[in-house]
Amino acid sequence: RGLILRSCVPSEEVEEGGRGIVATERVPPNTALCEIPERLILTARRSSVKRLGLSSLDVLAVELLIQRKRGDTNPYLSSLPTTYTNLHHWSARAAAELQCQDFIKHHGRLRDQALQDWKAVTETGGRAWCNCNFEDYLWARSTILSRSVYIPGPGNEAGGLVPVGDMFNYAPPAGPDPPLPPCFLDYYLRDEAEAKVDGQEAKRRKRGSESTYFAGVSGSGAYDEKSGCFIFRSGQRGYEAGEQIFVTYGMYTNRSLLEIYGFLLEDNPQDSVNLASVIDGDVLDGAAVAKLGSCFEVYQDGFPSWDLLCLVRWKAACLSHRGGKREARRIQTGCPCTLDLEAEAIEYLQEICSERLRRYGTSASQDEVTLSGLGGKEGEEGGLMELAVRWRLCQKRILVRAVGMCEAY
């Protein structure tokens, strides 16, 4: 029907992701792998559903449900998952296992908004079109949120659903590269050397980031107006025959991956822990006045963000020791403090990382024991509970790395 696959095939058995796209021969960088003509892409603009004030997302959701109700023999529809694990499917009980009040509250707001949107759909005739209940609506909404691609043009704000193309699994781009104090750089180099010795380096870089033919980030997809097709390419790297081909959706933390796609990555280089909730109010207020930024995070490798590094230095030099505007400006440009003040800054960083760890209801080692017990638990709720525990464990491991680097100072 016009869909073109080059040098790759869909596979129901891949090591990561369950099913995916696998190279059938050597694939050079920037190779066009999959072309889907626009006539095969399901969009709100091409839907038979009258808008009646509905958003593009809801029009496409209703169209999906109508086609499913009709029992269309569309192979793409029959290939879609019957259930999803992204955040608005979670119960309050599963969300509580995240042990993060901000995330738990966000889950509640997400569920409330989805319920409100479903009621709006039913009130404008959606129930008559497809006789959908709330769970049906969530299924359609999750299908769009987790599988749609960007298609230009008015009415296509929700994107489009592309057969076969949505089988490409995700590989994240490289993480942030913050400026590091010398002590952190020394710790990083030692950690990398130890990882090579015990074989952990290959495990860390497994997902589409290191192979015999690695040459950059994984592939991506884009709509090509000239051909009228959505085209997936191999990106800056190549693949050997038999390798799974990954694409990069964007820069997502594990929190965002859970919310939108319903999965997470154990070693996601884009992941981070926000520490704003454990920083003293007077420090946050002073940082705002000094224009030190607002991204107070530690990254997946335990390193502080630029804003966080400036904040802890500013607290040591200006708040605790009444340094002036000149010292604040030096800090903003990345200049380290004196040795004594630098030690005080790193000590405060360790303090807030440790406080964030203490605020969780369980330790990382307890979570590992919990995960071993959840591994064999059947049912959707058990799977969501496992995802929640895995997410909070990833957060704790980041903080443990950060504390370790501070202690090494």
Image (cartoon, rainbow, N blue to C red):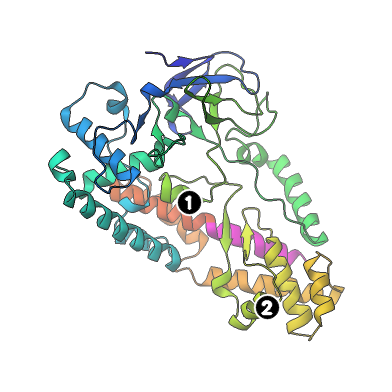
Residue 277 coordinates in the image, percent (x, y): 54, 72
User: Is 168 situated above or below 291?
Assistant: above
Q: CA distance from mark 2 to mark 1?
A: 30 Å
- Residue 361 picture quarter: bottom left
Q: Which residue is painted at 57% across and 61% down in the image?
A: 273
In the image, residue 311 above or below residue 262: below
Three-letter code, disc 2:
Val
Residue under pointer 2: 289
Viewer-proximal residue among 150 and 104 = 150
Vertically, is 327 above or below 58? below
Between 385 and 325, which is closer to the camera in this rendering?
Answer: 325
Q: Is residue 124 above or below residue 24?
A: below
- Amino acid type, callout 1: Ser
Q: Residue 381: x percent and y percent?
A: 29, 51
Q: Is residue 146 left or right of residue 239?
A: left
Along the viewing direction, whichever of 210 and 63 lies nearer the viewer: 63
Instruction: Please state, as top left, top right, bottom left or bottom right, where the N terminus lies in the image.
Output: top left
Locate the C terminus by quadrant: bottom right
* Residue at the image position 48 percent from the left and 29 percent from the top: 168
Prevailing SS of the magenta stretch: helix
**What secondary structure is found at the residue carrying circle 2?**
helix
- Mark 2: few/some/many CA within 10 Å (<14, 14-19, 20+): few
Q: Which residues are magenta?
A: 395-409
Q: Which residue is mark 1?
A: 256
Residue 290 position in % (x across, y down): 71, 76
Among the two numbered marks 2 and 1 on one chain, the one whose residue lies closer to the N terminus: 1
